[in-house]
Image: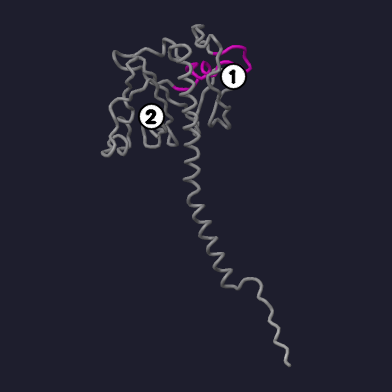
């Protein structure tokens, strides 16, 4: 009786199979690399939006507590029926210190915060309405060794904040002045002339130019 021949089982991959696997990996890697800049940009924009939401929430909470906007009289002047111009979250005002309260004092190592040049304390109760992290390399956070701070976005620009200083709960829509026709002249969803709000906040985006398509705003999703 003959013994059946011994067949060894095959192990490993053939050259063709290896080439197929390498090709698939290369295609997937190419897709990931090509999408990386877009994903990174979206991540940065999301982080800026989160700061805008935090800033807006802090302002709302301040309004609830003090029944006014966190700004002094020199900043609240308006022309006729128009609202006052936007203010920047930079060292020209104490908006950020006022909203941060004791957190701003701790960040700067001082004992008080929220007082304007005239000596008026805009947050006499010392309430912490919002907290912001310190910026790294001058980007995305608080800039300055001490109060007054600047609050800047991912590209080092301050945020713009506009209040409804004439108190009609109706603010002119900045989108009407946007240089991007997809926003200002959108035929499908045209921007309304007025927005039913009392606070508008926006970042001028990566290009650092106001009223362009990459602005990140509080009134649009």
Q: Which mark is residue 219?
A: 2
Position of residue 121 measured from the top left corner of the image (x, y, whole percent): 51, 9
Residue 28 vs residue 76: left or right?
right
Q: Is residue 218 magenta?
A: no
Residue 196: quadrant of the picture: top left
Q: Is residue 211 above or below residue 171?
A: below
Mark 2, residues whose alpha carbon is within 10 Å: few (<14), some, or many (≥20)? some
Name the residue that disc number 1 marks: 103
| Lower sequence index among marks 1 and 2 | 1
Position of residue 190 measured from the top left corner of the image (x, y, whole percent): 28, 34
Position of residue 213 measured from the top left corner of the image (x, y, whole percent): 37, 37
Q: Is residue 112 above or below residue 187?
A: above
Residue 180: quadrant of the picture: top left
Position of residue 64 measured from the top left corner of the image (x, y, whole percent): 46, 15
Q: Is residue 217 above or below residue 32?
A: above
Q: Which residues are magenta?
A: 88-113
Residue 6 vs residue 57: left or right?
right
Mark 1, residues whose alpha carbon is within 10 Å: few (<14), some, or many (≥20)? many
Residue sitting at x 61%, y 19%: 108
Residue 19: quadrant of the picture: bottom right
Determine contact: label 1, label 2, CB under 8 Å: no
């Amino acid at each position: 009786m003959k013994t059946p021949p011994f067949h060894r089982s095959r192990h490993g991959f053939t050259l063709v199979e290896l080439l197929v696997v390498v090709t698939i990996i290369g295609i997937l890697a190419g897709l990931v690399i090509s999408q990386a800049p877009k994903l990174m940009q979206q991540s940065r924009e999301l982080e800026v939006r989160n700061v805008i939401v935090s800033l807006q929430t802090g302002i709302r909470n301040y309004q609830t507590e003090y029944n006014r906007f966190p700004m002094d009289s020199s900043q609240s002047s308006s022309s006729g029926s128009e609202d006052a111009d936007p203010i920047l979250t930079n060292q020209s005002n104490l908006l950020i210190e006022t909203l941060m309260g004791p957190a701003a004092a701790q960040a700067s190592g001082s004992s008080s915060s929220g007082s304007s040049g005239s000596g008026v304390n805009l947050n006499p109760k010392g309430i912490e309405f919002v907290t912001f992290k310190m910026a790294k390399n001058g980007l995305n956070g608080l800039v300055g060794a001490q109060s007054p701070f600047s609050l800047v976005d991912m590209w080092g620009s301050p945020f713009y904040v506009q209040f409804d200083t004439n108190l009609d709960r109706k603010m002119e829509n900045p989108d009407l002045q946007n240089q991007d026709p997809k926003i200002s002249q959108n035929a499908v969803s045209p921007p309304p002339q007025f927005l039913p709000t009392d606070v508008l906040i926006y970042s001028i985006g990566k290009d650092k130019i106001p009223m362009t398509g990459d602005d990140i705003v509080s009134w649009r999703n």
